[in-house]
Image (tube, helix red, strand yellow):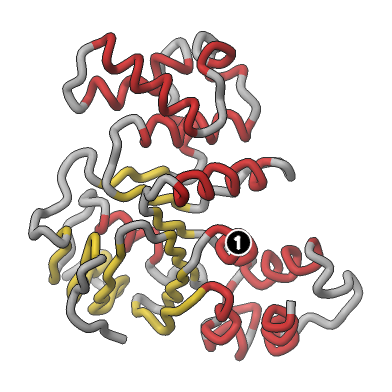
Amino acid sequence: MSEGPVNSGALLRAEGIRWTADAGLPGSRDVLRGITLTLHENEACGIVGPSGAGKTTLVTVLAGLLAPDHGDVRFADGTVPGPGDVGLVFQEAERAFFEETVLDDVAFGARNIGLDEPAARERAREALHAVGLDPATFGDRAPETLSGGEARRAAIAGVLVMEPRLVVFDEPPTGLAAAGPERLHDVLRDLRERGVPTLTVSHDLDFVRETCGRVVVLEEGAITWDGPADSLADGLPESWRRNPGDSGGEMALIAAAMVRRGWIGAGDAVTPEALAARWRNG
């Protein structure tokens, strides 16, 4: 699936991206197969797909952390993403805390892009405010004293402090207690209102549908669907319809999300067709 020319609202474009795992070795695998994707200013975009579809590899390429074998990634102004341009919030990013206090850890990114200590700490306070953590309350705390949701938001602040042009979230709800995703909803909604472009990769289709306006479906390293989030049921990968077991835990996560919303009963038959119909009518 390909796209047309970059329009005036474009932010970042990936053109013909290919990447092969273990290239040249027995058992090599084409992870990304000629992906072309344009992300836009002020856009909240999601990427979904079965395990092994290439989602995390794609966002790592977009962030400039992995060079593609073929293809090109550039901002609309023609520049290649450099340090701090794309902020990548990894799965359970809070495990990477290493400073003694939350404020110092968040300020690290600002120091890393050249701000002096007073400016870095002020930027860190602003970033903590942006994710709903009062720096007067949380700034001097040790990171290990935070709850899971608080730690995840502090990790996001550590990316926002660099004021990236695009923020990428890789499985943001992973490992959070029940209330955690709701707080993340608030953070992503606030970023969207502030005009910060975001790209969210998640197996939680409920989370993606509620936090993104556009969703891209990836399967076997290629884009199979790209459209509005409220039409996502039409774009669910064909493999999910053929055999839910092929997608590992994703179908269970989809069903659980729909049970939480009351769209299906806990004892109802769960087939790909039923899920798609319920999603469409939910």
Q: Quadrant of the N terminus?
A: bottom left
Q: Quadrant of the C terminus?
A: bottom right
> Mark 1 highlights which residue?
210
Residue drawn where x is 56% and y is 78% of the image: 232
Q: Residue furthest left?
A: 78
Q: Nearer the viewer, residue 10 or 159?
A: 10
- The x and y percentages for residue 61 are 25, 58
176 relative to 266 in the view: left or right: left
Secondary structure, mark 1, is: helix
Q: Quadrant of residue 211?
A: bottom right
- The x and y percentages for residue 54 are 38, 67
Q: Residue furthest right?
A: 267
Q: Quadrant of residue 42?
A: bottom left
Q: Nearer the viewer, residue 29 or 5?
A: 5
80 relative to 183 in the view: left or right: left
20 relative to 198 in the view: left or right: left
Residue drawn where x is 18% and y is 79% of the image: 5
Q: Quadrant of residue 249?
A: bottom right
Residue 27 visible from this viewpoint: no
Q: Nearer the viewer, residue 62 or 184?
A: 184
Question: Amino acid type of disc 1?
Answer: Glu
Residue drawn where x is 43% and y is 59% of the image: 44
